[in-house]
Amino acid sequence: RRLIVTGNVVAPELELIIAGTIEGNVTAGHILISDTGLISGDIRANIVDVAGELHGRVEAMAVALRSSARVNATIYHNKLIVENGAKVKGLQPWRPEGYMENKQIG
């Protein structure tokens, strides 16, 4: 069995580790989607680290897509790391360093 959360999660000053499923938008300081985690919705964070599955839109300063990541998203980022083996669909538009400061998290 796995936990499924339906609705938005807002925790702008916290680090969230997602091992279940979230069907909704997520805002946090740092979001880690584990290899068993899935987010279907838009996410905003300073740092996003994806080892699991993500469908939606991402706004983050730094994004890491691990080798086990399965992503179908538009990723707005300043820094992007994509490990060999990650499955990625969508756009990855770069944003300047001050981008997230102008769109404060929280």
Image (cartoon, rainbow, N blue to C red):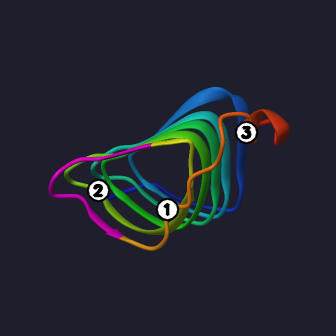
Crowding at dot 3, Cα within 10 Å, few <14 / some 14-19 / many 20+, comes out as: some
| Location of the N terminus (image quadrant) | bottom left
Q: Which mark is nearer the camera, 2 or 3?
A: 3
Does label 1 or label 2 sit earlier along the sequence?
2
> Picture coordinates of residue 51 (x, y %)?
30, 48
Query: Residue 79, image x and y in percent?
Result: 48, 40
Q: Give the range drawn in magenta.
A: 80-88
Q: How much space separates mark 1 and mark 3, taking CA atoms? A: 15 Å
Residue marked by disc 3: 100
Distance of label 1 from label 2 (alpha carbons): 15 Å
Q: Residue at x 20, y 50 (%)?
A: 67
Marks 1 and 2 in Cβ contact (< 8 Å): no
Q: What element carries label 2?
A: loop
- At horizontal 32% and vertical 54% (from top left) the residue drawn is 52
Residue type of the residue flagged with mark 3: Met
The residue most toward the left is 85
Foreground: 36 or 28?
28
User: Percent position (x, y) of residue 18?
Assistant: 45, 44
Q: Earlier in the sequence, mark 2 or mark 3?
A: 2
Residue 92: give its label.
1
Place residue 41 in its image quadrant.
bottom right
